[in-house]
Amino acid sequence: MSKLARALLLVATVAAMNLAGLTAAAHAQASDEDTTTQQEVAENWSYYQQSTRVPPAELKARMQADATRRELSDRWTYYYHATRMSPAELEAWMQAKDRGDTSTEPPAQVPASVRPTGPSGQPAWLVVSLGGLAAALALVAGLAVVAARRANRRARVGQAA
């Protein structure tokens, strides 16, 4: 095998491995952007487990107790913020809660690092097409190596005859 064929094969292999890794990372990142959070999944699983193994009357009582507990927590949160915020801030916070914002913190206490809502990273079609290109390059390099070996064998057979 010539040095050029070896170099081509090495470059194609490294490129294919690099793009395969990028493809795997892109797919892993895409699956992380699921709309449900781990807490929601845990709550749904907990509800399913409770509803399938608890008698209906006891399940209803538990759900009512949970609703009461949430209502008391909301009241405590309101009074806690009402004693520490100006009336204008409190009104803005209550309007945000009424719009469906589930945050229990007032707007002034929102953390600075907020995750962007848009997609991040490379588009999926680009990563997949680059992976296909790397695979095609590796195939071409392999075929070049096979052709070089055959040519080398023919040259040896021709010299012997």
Image: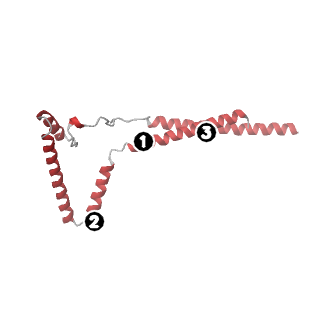
Give the label on residue 53, or none. 2
Residue at the spot 12% in from the left edge and 33% down from the top edge: 88
In the rendered image, residue 53, in percent from the top left (x then y), is placed at: 28, 65
Which residue is disc 3 drawn over?
13
- The amino acid at mark 2 is Arg
**Gap between marks 2 and 3 measured at Cα:** 54 Å
Residue 128 pos. (x, y %):
49, 38
In the image, taking residue 1 as reference, residue 60 lies left or right, namely left
Q: Few, some or many C-alpha atoms within 10 Å of disc 2 (few <14, some 14-19, many ≥20)?
A: few
| First in residue order: circle 2 vs circle 1 | 1
**Disc 2 secondary structure class:** helix
Residue 5 in percent (x, y) is at: 69, 35
Q: Nearer the viewer, residue 48 or 81?
A: 81
The image quadrant that residue 89 belongs to is top left
Q: Give coordinates of residue 106: x percent, y percent.
A: 20, 38
Q: Earlier in the sequence, mark 1 or mark 3?
A: 3
Q: Amino acid at mark 3?
A: Thr
Which residue type carries mark 1?
Answer: Gln
Q: Residue at x 67, y 34 (%)?
A: 7
Circle 1 Cα neighbour tier, 10 Å, few/some/many (<14 / 14–19 / ≥20): some
Q: Quadrant of the C terminus?
A: top right
- Per the image, label 1 sits on a secondary structure element best described as helix
Residue carrying label 1: 29
